[in-house]
Image (cartoon, helix red, strand yellow):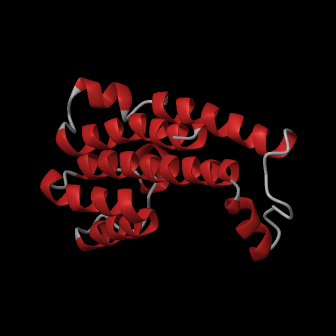
Amino acid sequence: MTTYELLFYLIHLPVMVGWACLVFAPRSEVTAQLAHSGAIPLLLGLVYAALLFTGVFLGQSAEGAGMSSLPAVIALLSHPVGALTGWVHFILFDFFCGAWIARDAARLGLSHGWTVPVLILTLMFGPLGLAAHVLRRLATGAGLSLAGAALRPSSSRR
């Protein structure tokens, strides 16, 4: 197993523990400390920064890699460091959305049993899970606003 492959597996550990907490123990103190804190984003943010630094400043990237065109993005993701950097980005943002979905659903009083499929959809296909949650908000009368009560204009608070 290469170092890149080992790193690929290791970066999944905190995220999968977080997802397990969201699905199986939504109201536990462990979930609050892991999934609803900045711990996992901070850890993987540091990994992301190290990978980004390695790719940009240490030359660990493919020829023509960049973000200015589709061929440049393809080249960027064709190198193991670029692929790992992109993967950390994907799984961290999907997890962040999943944690927010779990908090939002709980705040709205939505059934956790019906939140679990949305969380799984978010884990596997991030934007589809987020869209499913927004549709569920609409179906339950919660509306399109994703702002919490504290962020709504004062004229709409009651």
Across and down, in percent, residue 127 comes to 45, 66
User: Residue at point 36% right, 35% down?
Assistant: 35
Q: Is residue 152 left or right of residue 69?
A: left
Residue 59 placement, left or right of 32: right
Q: Position of residue 9 (x, y in %)?
A: 45, 41
The one of 7 and 29 positioned closer to us in this rendering: 7
**Residue 60's x, y, as percent?**
79, 46
35 over 122 or under it: above or below: above
Number of marks: 0
Residue ranking furthest to the front: 1
Asked whether the viewer can see residue 63, the reply is yes
Residue for point 61% across, 49% down: 84
97 is higher (above) or lower (below) than 75: above
Would residue 116 appear left or right of 56 to someone viewing this image? left
- Asked whether 50 or 128 is in front, the reply is 50
The answer to which of 48 and 58 lies nearer the viewer is 58
At a point 22% along the width and 61% down the height, the residue shown is 117
Position of residue 75 measured from the top left corner of the image (x, y, whole percent): 75, 65
The residue under the point 86% across, 64% down is 64
